[in-house]
Image (cartoon, rainbow, N blue to C red):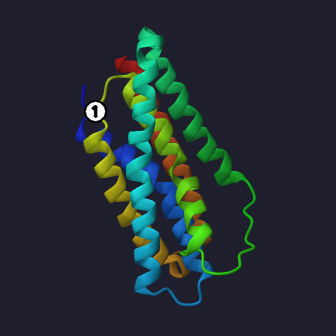
Amino acid sequence: MELGWIALLGLSIGLAMDAFAVAVAVGMTLNTVTPQHVFRLAFHFGLFQFLMPISGWLAGEQIATQIGQYGAWVAFALLGYVGGKMLWEAHSEKNSESTGDPTRGLKLLTLSIATSLDALAVGMSMALVGVSVWLPSVVIGVITAGMTAVGITFGSKIGARWEYWAEIAGGIVLILIGFSILWRG
């Protein structure tokens, strides 16, 4: 089974919304955004968003035979959880304390992992419903890198109000994709 292009783009944009929101926040915290900042953040966020679905898919392949006919329900639950978490986090209070350059070192690694954990669950759900992970992972990584570059570049201009709507939209898209999988499964 393969994802259609509309579903794939929706999934990719939905997963990239966390990275976009974080990139906007990073752009707002830096005095001046340089091309090096943009490259480091976009490259790492895109790379992690590419690798996490593959890791999740490999883990999902191991348990797919054990879950059997309930795979669509598990995929729905995972995507629903991730989407719901994004909606919840959009309404929670943000910690604006930041020191240092978040596009370097341990902060960059932490942000890269944190923004891509959702993609791990998505990769697992792909394995459970028999969807190949390779093309989706590439598309997810490229779209995430692009949206991250836009987010950090225009972070100070976009402002915090778009960060909220990006998280809301991402959560809704993931939940709708979960319903779609459940409907087809």
Question: In terms of depth relative to the viewer, which is nearer, 21 or 58?
Answer: 58
- The residue under the point 60% across, 80% down is 101
Quadrant the C terminus occupies: top left
Query: Residue 143 sits in which quadrant?
Result: bottom left
Question: In terms of depth relative to the viewer, which is nearer, 60 or 177?
Answer: 60
Badge 1 amino acid? Ser
Element at badge 1?
loop
Residue 52: give x, y in percent of width and height. 44, 46
- The residue under the point 45% across, 49% down is 15
User: For the view shown, which residue lies furthest in the top direction?
Assistant: 69
Establish if 27 lies above or below 88: below
User: For the view shown, which residue lies furthest in the bottom direction?
Assistant: 32
Residue 23: give x, y in percent of width and height. 52, 69
Establish if 177 lies above or below 105: above
Residue 153 seen in this snapshot: no
Residue 184: give x, y in percent of width and height. 34, 19
**Residue bearing the label numbered 1:** 132
Circle 1 packing at 10 Å, graded few (<14), some (14-19), many (20+), is: some
Residue 136: give x, y in percent of width and height. 30, 43
Residue 170 seen in this snapshot: yes
Question: In terms of depth relative to the viewer, which is nearer, 131 or 82?
Answer: 131
Quadrant the N terminus occupies: top left
Establish if 56 lies above or below 97: above
Q: Describe residue 137's horizontal placement relative to residue 56 as left or right.
A: left
